[in-house]
Image (spheres, rainbow, N blue to C red):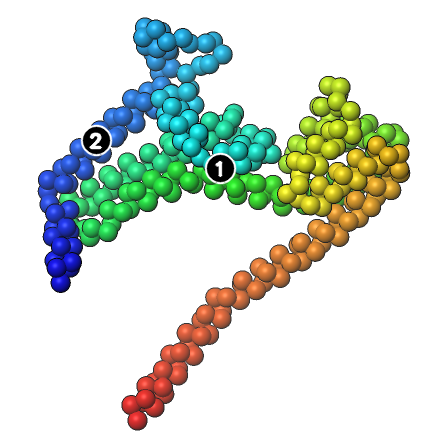
Amino acid sequence: MEIFNLFDSLINWLNNRALILGLALAFAIGIGIFFYSIVLPILRPEQVAVEKLLKGASLSENEPISFSNTYLAQISKALAKRDSRKNMYEEYLDLLGYPGKYKDIGDLYTQAVFYGILWTILSAGFLVILNLSTPIPALLYLFVPVSGYLGYNGQFSKIKNMVDKRRMDMLVEFPSAMSAILINYNATNSLASAIINYVAYPPAKTGYLFYELKRITERYLSGTPLSETLLEAQRRTRDVPIVSTGFMQLHAAETQGTSVSTALRMTAQRAYDNLEVVLTTRTRRNQALALVPSIIAVISVMIQFLLPFVTGISLF
């Protein structure tokens, strides 16, 4: 009983006006810090640059004031040093070709901190406004740190989802790409020329597999042996086994002098077969998931129909 009384006292304390005013003040201070340290450097970069020079700080011409090098970046760097996931997400960004505003791993942590702070401030403001109209349970105050946590980790979940999408896109793109490269190889009798022609000539191509083939082309034209670029592509696509195996077979054919045409043909055929299996499996899974609402509805009807009989038997 003493525990329940203590909890009731805690609820009453949380709902008093003094705490509400404190939350409102903290919210206002948070908005001020947010605007001064994040929004102002974005909206008025020249003014911030002058302030840095007046304070004796160096400002490189190659380092413009932007979202990624504001005060927020200092917090991001500290978090990145302590995060065991840093290397994994750095590899993810490299595989994705550093999409959007992500120029390096620091930008990812900066975005994460930005949204963590933003959602914390917004959730605190929402609770303040809600409590002004009616008292709220103490447990709802957990909404503030939970919102900040979700805002922070949401950026990392976004990158994970993009990596998952990359895998599926590669499975879809790989068969047709290998078939097109095979046609180019039969015309040029050179694997390097076949890949270059596929990348360089229309129709215009996009996608994660094209990005890997473009990397192969750029590194080859810069002087890297084709076998080395294929081996690198094999390592970069190891999370997509059928693609990784295909690059390994092309590497073996290029280095060991076996038939490149046969390797391309077999790789394309296996890729088409694998894609068919994957699409069939996904279709069956989606069909099974589509039945779930119907099954739930049937069970609900059966419960409503049988409940009076079960109740009558138990009373009897």
35 sits to left or right of 69: left
**Residue at 34% of width from left, 6% of height from top?**
56
The front one of 198 and 241 is 241
Residue 168, position in %: x, y? Answer: 63, 46
The front one of 12 and 84 is 84
**Residue at 30% of width from left, 27% of height from top?**
34
The reply to whether the C-beta atoms of the residues labelled 1 and 2 are less than 8 Å apart is: no
The front one of 143 and 173 is 143
12 sits to left or right of 219: left
Q: Amino acid at mark 2?
A: Ala
Q: Is residue 3 visible?
A: yes
Picture layout, residue 247 above or below residue 136: above
**Residue at 13% of width from left, 54% of height from top?**
6
Q: Earlier in the sequence, mark 1 or mark 2?
A: 2
Q: Which residue is mark 1?
A: 85
298 sits to left or right of 166: left
The N terminus sits in image quarter? bottom left
Secondary structure at badge 1 equals: loop
Q: Dot 1, crowdedness within 10 Å: few (<14), some or many (≥20)?
A: few
Secondary structure at badge 2 equals: helix
Quadrant in the picture for residue 7: bottom left
Q: Which mark is residue 208?
A: none
Q: Which residue is mark 2?
A: 28
Q: Amino acid at mark 1?
A: Arg
State which mark lies toward you, 1 or 2: 1
Residue 175, position in %: x, y? Answer: 74, 44
Distance from the alpha carbon under mark 1 to that under mark 2? 33 Å
Quadrant in the picture for residue 116: top left
Residue 156, position in %: x, y? Answer: 47, 39
Q: Dot 2, crowdedness within 10 Å: few (<14), some or many (≥20)?
A: some
- Count up the numbered dots: 2
Toward the bottom, the furthest residue is 316
